[in-house]
Amino acid sequence: MIEAHELSRRYGSFTAVDRISFSVEEGAIVGILGPNGAGKTTTIRMITGFLPPTGGRVTVAGKDLFVEPRKARRDIGYLPENVSLYPEMRVREYLAYRARLEGMPRRDAKKALGETIERAMLADVADQIIGTLSKGYRQRVGLAAAILHRPRVLVLDEPTVGLDPKQIVSIRELIRELGKNATLLLSTHILPEVELLCDRVMIIDRGQIVADGTTEELHQRWLGRRGLRVAVRPDGASAADVAEVLARLPGVAKMQQVVTPVAELAAFRLEIDAGLDPREEVFRAAVERGWVLFELAEERGSLEDVFVQLTTRDAAETGAEEAAAALAAAEAPAPAAPDEEVPS
């Protein structure tokens, strides 16, 4: 559905995006992560046609975005991080205007308008002036404009920014629903959001893709084996006896004794081979020997751990790169105004 090949963007001597290539299959929900200045927003702007690349190409549903821009953009819905709206227009009026910009037939536009207002939870403010809305409601107006023409590809840059917790839950449910009928690219700084919503994750750093895969694949590749915490009170046995039993269980690759505040407990951290789960065997071993099982819990790294490991650098280097990225953003052409023909 989306293919980027050798995509690059340079600003003088600074390279914001450096020859990245990826593809997104139809119906997938893909999260894009990266620290500030990593190049993810620049990548999104090139994919949506808001920013021309220095090199490379993008195709959307088989159409080259830079050879057939009008046709390709009809399949794209875009919610930028900073939504540009007409503050003097009412919500319903603005969305009707966007429908005309998309070239939607009047009958289709009227039906889509009502459905979109409901889906984006805007019914209570549909006739209110946009300039009087809270940031959260303005964000939802931007999302409504992005989905109004039922695009096949939906690109969302920080879709839940400015929303309260209840609204965030509602928008996440909407994103899941949209993912049933569209291909989604989701950029966010909320890592649990990516784990909840996305089938696949791309991490961009210094203008390049440094990791790409499912969250499980990233865990396995960058964090190694899963861990298991076990603590027992081995009445009549020593910690060495417990260690010997645990070491023989299937799936236990390595183990390490850990210190606990309770002196009579024998506690260990086990490293587990991929695809195996020895928790039931640990439980049975404890029961058979009359040990009191105090703790049996899976211990695994999070997507945040992967992200930090791949993108951490020293403060001086980070400051220099963020300054260069800010300068590049200031020099970039501004996105088209709402009254121009743009992808929603």
Image (cartoon, helix red, strand yellow):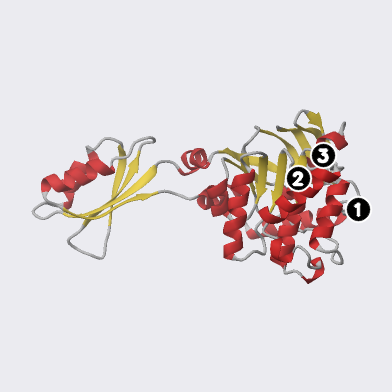
Residue extending furthest left? 236
Residue extending furthest top? 62
Query: Disc 2 and disc 3: Cα gap in Å?
Result: 8 Å
The reply, left or right, for residue 102 in relation to residue 232 is: right
Q: Position of residue 311 (x, y in %)?
A: 60, 50
Q: Position of residue 324 (x, y in %)?
A: 78, 55
Q: For the residue marked with disc 1, what is the amino acid?
A: Asp
Looking at the rendering, which quadrant does residue 322 occupy?
Answer: bottom right
Is residue 92 visible to the viewer in this orientation of the structure? yes
Give the total number of marks visible in the rendering. Answer: 3
- Count residues near mark 1 (Cα–Cα under 10 Å), then give few for <14, some for 14-19, many for 20+: few
Q: For the residue marked with disc 2, what is the amino acid?
A: Gly
Disc 1 secondary structure class = loop
Of 125 and 158, nearer the camera is 125
Q: Position of residue 88 (x, y in %)?
A: 87, 67
Q: For the residue marked with disc 3, what is the amino acid?
A: Arg
Residue drawn at x 18%, y 52% as measured from the top left:
239
Disc 3 secondary structure class = helix
The reply, left or right, for residue 75 in relation to residue 336 is: left
- Count residues near mark 3 (Cα–Cα under 10 Å), then give few for <14, some for 14-19, many for 20+: many
Task: Look at the picture and state if 249 lies above or below 80.
Answer: above
Q: Which residue is mark 3?
A: 73
